[in-house]
Amino acid sequence: MPVPSDAEVDRCISTLYEAVLDPTLWESGLEQLAALGGAAHASLTDADFLHGILWRSVFHNIDDEANELYFSRYAAVDPRSSLMLAPSTLANTWVSDNEAFDAAFRNASAVYREYFVPRGVTESVMAKVAVEGSRMGALGLLRTVDAGAMPLETRATIARVLPHADRAIRLARRMTSFAAAVDIGRSVLDAYDEPVASVDADGLVLLTNGAFDNLLAQGSVFRFSRSRVSLLDPSAQRKFALALREATDLANGVVSSLPRSAPTISVPRGVRAPLQVSVAPLMRAANGSSWFSRRGALVKITDPARAPSTELLQKSFGLTRAEARVCAAVMEGGPNAEIAQRLNVAVTTLKSQLASVYAKTHTKSRASLVLAIRSLPR
């Protein structure tokens, strides 16, 4: 197969970034990635393996029946999962199972013998991306008999996609609750309780919602002068400026070979947990109803100390409403006596509820519980 062109690679990268704010485009991005790698099938999963939570699963050319069969019968014994989770397997690197497992091993594995071989799959090329604690994204390309093994030159070329896929998945985690509102309109975004704004490469503020306006008025995080915004912390501002330039370049179709900025910048707040400033490209021009009308960068501020909604906590961990309220109170901090007083329950009741929360979230301490809660999308 011919080596993918730069234009084809850039087009796939752009689609992955567009999917940050339009999740329906993940499948299109996978289709383009499969074409780049000469693969018949492609998959993307984003899961928290410690807590057994599957946040996102997207498939290209894998039907529901085959997918259900795999997860019900073979997922638990698939040796590729152990390979991806192994610390020795580097992130943002394509790994071929033909190189990781010899033919004898594959022939002895039920996954290969009963699932892949009957479907004509001869090679699985995988990469782990966006590793944050126990949460990990995984990309997979399945090649068939007709395609043969992926040429090393092709694998090296499509490796350009991986750091951008890593960044797009990290951003998507932080934009999940926001993405649905982007194309709805100004009134919805004004009601959105986290600060969001559209900003150009030089920090010129194009649009804000009410929460962002309030944050600017406080003057504790941003400096706002001549319609331009900058972070008060010098180190964070340097990272923020670079992120704005790169996001705006991406919005205008300029794809760098390797992103230099972090998708999320931590802003110190003394003894409190740092604020998280996420910067994503606004890839598409407005269609008349969209909140934004110019290409640029989307800036979203997340307070890690702010707990997710009780509904999300209940759904994610199988908690009762009372236990979800305990999680939210733990995020606010304070000793047990103070938390019990805020919740208007006895300390013994609180301890009992905490024990149940630890069991359901597979955590053993306040610190690990807070980390598990922070892993949830905002």
Image (spheres, helix red, strand yellow):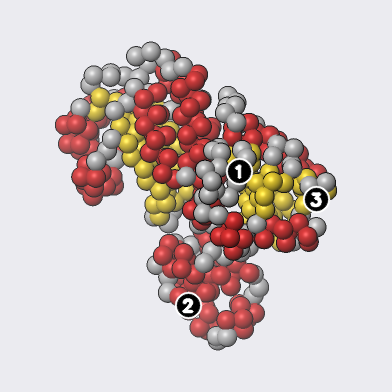
Judged from this view, the residue extending furthest toward the right is: 225
Single out the mark in the foreground, 2 or 1.
1
Single out the mark in the foreground, 3 or 2.
3
Give residue 103's position: percent from left, percent from top.
25, 24
Judged from this view, the residue extending furthest toward the top is: 2
Residue in the image at 50% along x and 83% along y:
349
| Residue annotated with mark 2 | 322
Give residue 109's position: percent from left, percent from top.
22, 35
Amino acid residing under circle 1: Ser
Q: Nearer the viewer, residue 37 or 85?
A: 37
User: Which of marks 1 and 2 precedes in the sequence?
Assistant: 1
How dense is the environment of label 2, judged by Cα within 10 Å: few (below 14), some, or many (20 and up)? some
Amino acid residing under circle 3: Phe
Label 2 and label 1: CA atoms lie apart by 43 Å
Callout 1 secondary element: loop
Amino acid residing under circle 2: Ala
